[in-house]
Amino acid sequence: MNRRYLMAMLALILAGAVVEVWAASVGEAAPAFTATDTNNHVHKLSDYKGRFVVLEWTNRDCPFTAKHYKSGNMERLQHEWTKRGVVWLTVVSSAPGEQGYVMGGEENAYMAENQGAPTAVLLDPSGKLGHLYDAKTTPHMFVIDRKGILIYDGAIDDRATTDVADIAGAKNYVVQALQEAMAGRPVTVATSRPYGCSVKYKD
Amino acid sequence: MHFEFWELREFWVPTARLAVPRNPTLKPWRCGRGLNGMGENRRRLGKTARVSVLGLWCFFAVLCAAAGTSAEIHNQHAKVDLVAAKDAVAPGETAWLGLHFVLEPGWHIYWQNPGDSGEPPSVRWTLPAGFHAGAIEWPAPQRLGSGSVIDFGYSGEVLLMIPLATPANAAPGTRENLGAAAKWLVCCEICVPDQAPLSLTMNIVARPLHAGRELPPGAALPLFERFRKLIPAAVPSNWKVTAISDGDDFILSVETGTAEEHAAFYPFLPDPIENSAPQTAARLPKGVQLRLHKSDQVVKPVTMLKGVLELGDPQGRSVAAYRVTVPVRQASKR
């Protein structure tokens, strides 16, 4: 009995270790995760098989993120795509004491005030989910298709600036990936270099 | 606790091959708070440190007042001004202007390719008719950041030099106002976007001047002489630079004629290499070979490596930088 318990523990640890080193790679299955949102609800990636999933790394005080929130661009995207059945998960990987770290209630109030509409905001203060996907910047965007395959990893658009005026003429890679994949076409830009502030992980 | 000033003292000692101290991948352990700072770093700064930062800023303020630079602006975490190498220019000639940044300890701005995060500074000019400002001549950058996010930029002090073409019909004896709306992002763990309306008055003088007289130097001329040395030079014609694509890596080789201990490459464009991957330099009898890890984001094969190649001594502290543009060959099959 004792030995079986030990073996089970060992298997769990190994499984955990495997997940840790299995970084996200476009064209392959998106790494499985379980995370808790600002309302204490638990989200598993596997819950969303059959739906498109967008992961958006955020830090509201980062000027690059602020460009997309203050202009209403990110909120607009969240509204539009969740209405079309996409699961939009905003992720906060800032560690406690670092810029962008928030508690659930505070983040809910911010989203309500800005009329943001993600499916959920996942709190990742340990940085586990961030490291699993190797999220480098805020914003850093990922798109997962209905089969759970990662189809986009990179920047939100092609204008790596903090200037709100640049949103109008930008090519939004997330929108493009979703449109193409939903139309059954291959994604033309499947990776790009993410831009923004570094994710404020625990040191 | 007067560490901040002494950390910066090297900036005031101009030497032939050393001007920017290199701190390869050191994460700044403390971010200074500007005089007009928003207080976001209060958490990290003790009272003593705050007092001595204030002392440092007073020191800079006095120094710059004595040097007589114009249009100086104290912003969050940086002092920024527009300076000229010479106070006057003749019609049809080129004047050198510069955006001079003095950053708080720990804070940095970005190079033309900011690396994995950040944004380079930019200028929007308001110039009299016929005047034309060229592109920024970027000094070789420093490698900043840690872990999987590596940036290219400047800490301490930097002069971003810009050539100004004067029209041939400019009238000698007049003074022209040059306006520069500068925008930049300054970061130290967190980032703050900032901007300043800068300006400078330039005297238009006739050529030839009185016999034996040159254009009068500006107060900032020593600054230009110091930072001009950091602008990457063309590769000497007797050197041989080659690049090959070898699996997941590029191998950049330089033959300079002597064995080189240190080399680093900074790409002009964000795409070709993984910034956070270590760059391993191997000494060659007559040069150096540098192994660069390809970026995962490269979709199309890279046919040309373009960037700044830095060579120096084993400690990596005495450096010279060169602009390289080299076609990439496929590794020969073995």
Image (spheres, grey):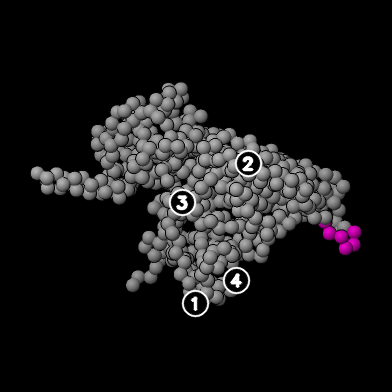
Q: Residue B30 carries which label?
A: none
Q: Crowdedness of circle 1 by 10 Å Cα count: few (<14), some, many (20+)?
A: few
- The residue where tag 2 is placed is B51
- Pointers 2 and 4 in contact (C-beta within 8 Å): no
- The residue where tag 1 is placed is B285
Q: What element carries label 1?
A: loop
Task: Give the farthest residue toward the right.
Answer: B210
Question: Mark 1 against mark 4, which lies toward the viewer?
Answer: 1
Q: Crowdedness of circle 2 by 10 Å Cα count: few (<14), some, many (20+)?
A: few
- The residue where tag 3 is placed is B146
Q: Which mark is residue B237?
A: 4
**Pick the front one: B264 or B130:** B264
Looking at the rendered structure, the kind of residue marked 2 is Val
Seen at 44% across and 28% down, the residue is: A75
Whichever of callouts 2 and 4 sits on the residue coming sooner in the sequence is 2
Q: Looking at the picture, does residue B278 appear above or below residue B109?
A: below
* Dot 2: chain letter: B
From where the camera sits, is residue A86 visible?
no
Marks 1 and 3, Cα distance to the nearest angstrom?
32 Å
Q: Crowdedness of circle 3 by 10 Å Cα count: few (<14), some, many (20+)?
A: some
Looking at the rendered structure, the kind of residue marked 1 is Pro
Is disc 4 on the same chain as disc 3?
Answer: yes
Marks 2 and 3, Cα distance to the nearest angstrom?
29 Å
* Dot 1: chain letter: B
Whichever of callouts 1 and 4 sits on the residue coming sooner in the sequence is 4
First to last magenta residue range: B210-215
Q: Looking at the picture, does residue B185 appear above or below residue B300?
A: above
Looking at the rendered structure, the kind of residue marked 3 is Ser
The answer to whether residue B212 is magenta is yes
Whichever of callouts 3 and 4 sits on the residue coming sooner in the sequence is 3
**Pick the front one: B25 or A118:** B25
Is disc 4 on the same chain as disc 2?
Answer: yes
